Image (tube, coloured by chain):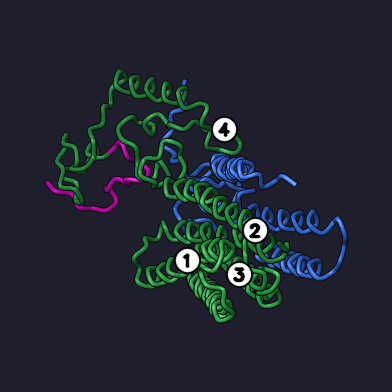
Amino acid sequence: MTDTDNDTKPDPDTEPAATGTTEVDVDPDTGAKPGEVAPGIPADPATPAANAVVEAAAEGANEALGTLDPTDDGGRPIVEAGAGAGNWVPEGAFGDHGGSTTGLSNVKMGMWLFLASECLLFGGLISTYMLYRGRHTSNLGPDQIYDIPFTSVSSFVLLMSSLTMVLAVSAAHRKDERNARLWLVITAVLGATFVGGQVYEFTSFYREGLGYTTSLFSSSFYTLTGFHGVHVTLGIVMLLSTVFMLRGGRITEGKKAESIEIVGLYWHFVDIVWIIIFTLVYLIPA
Amino acid sequence: MTDVTATAPADDHTDASGHGHGHGHEGDGFSAEEPGAHHGPSDIRLIQIAVVLAVVTGVEVLISYVDIGPLFIPGLLGLMVFKFFVVVLYFMHLKFDNPIFRNLFWMGLFLAPLVFCGALATFHFFSP
């Protein structure tokens, strides 16, 4: 007889090993009969020997990965022995990050790696500028064309966009999606203001006669600041895309805060690059 | 023997996003923790940090107009490094994040100046 009484329905969160072995004749959700394993759920070994094998494998994995401690307090083994009953690793056992063996988000790890490589990119561009900043015509050098007050305001705007970005991340962690979206939009507006200022600056420099090929100084300057501007522009695209995806529900509930945090990492990175450019390029004279 | 448990790492102190005692979001984005439970800097503290950064930027600009002699370049570089690390540690939460992320970033960050100082040296950039 089929028993569809909800009181007898096993709770998949608390009784994973009991699936298919309860008093229910036919599982109302999966249709599995007694003795059968529900579709999509690996069989429960349910034998001491099988459990011992799983435990031994997990212990070996923990020893092998012992040097990669993903915790700050170092307390937890990376592999949790096949999640106890030895039947399957429950959803979220690796933090919902696609089976990351470090227990960390692969996406976040990838972003940090990307930012580390970006350090090398901007390091190269800044070095090139430092090398060639003195190679200019007599009347079109850094001291003649830079407008420090204007660039200082641009720097302030970008710095404040970092504040609004981190407030967006903070709101996201509080599950305050409305404010998170608001801060993201404000961040994008501040970023667009910065890019607009850069376009204005480039235009005024060009009108003064400083073209891209005018001198080695101009080439290295436009390349460095232009690359940074492109990064800011891409950041704005990422911010607005995130806002639209949040509004459209295209980011799953469990990924929202992390998605905003990843975009935030990129945004803060372009800010710290500008902190260096502002000092080395604009404030320290050639 | 290995501790056998069905508890997901999401219940641990370190979440899967890598925050040791950072935000407390459990790697699942908007977690089930109470709203407002936030182990990183509070919003007020973040605003205070931003005000400090703005003031430091103002000091940088001021220094560029005032003659402070031989302290000019070291002073500007010092303020630049201060701003850089404040943003990285607090706004990027690296201070509260997992050591693996920290090491990844420091690796790229410290490798870059070493490589490019070497490159500049080949062009006699540091020669008088």
Q: Which colour denotes chain A?
A: green
- From the viewer's perspective, is the residue at label 4 or at label 2 nearer? 2
* Residue picked out by circle 4: A75
Q: Nearer the viewer, residue A119 or A241?
A: A119
Residue on which the image places disc 3: A158
Q: Is residue A15 magenta?
A: yes
Dot 1 falls on a residue whose secondary structure is helix
**Host chain of mark 2:** A
Q: Are marks 4 and 3 in contact (CB under 8 Å)?
A: no
Give the labeled residue for mark 1.
A230
* Of labels 4 and 3, the one closer to you: 3
Label 1: how many residues lie within 10 Å, few (<14), some (14-19) or many (20+)?
few
Q: Is residue A99 above or below residue A270?
A: above
Q: Find the magenta span and give its range.
A: A1-18
Distance from the alpha carbon under mark 2 to that under mark 1: 17 Å
Mark 1 belongs to chain:
A
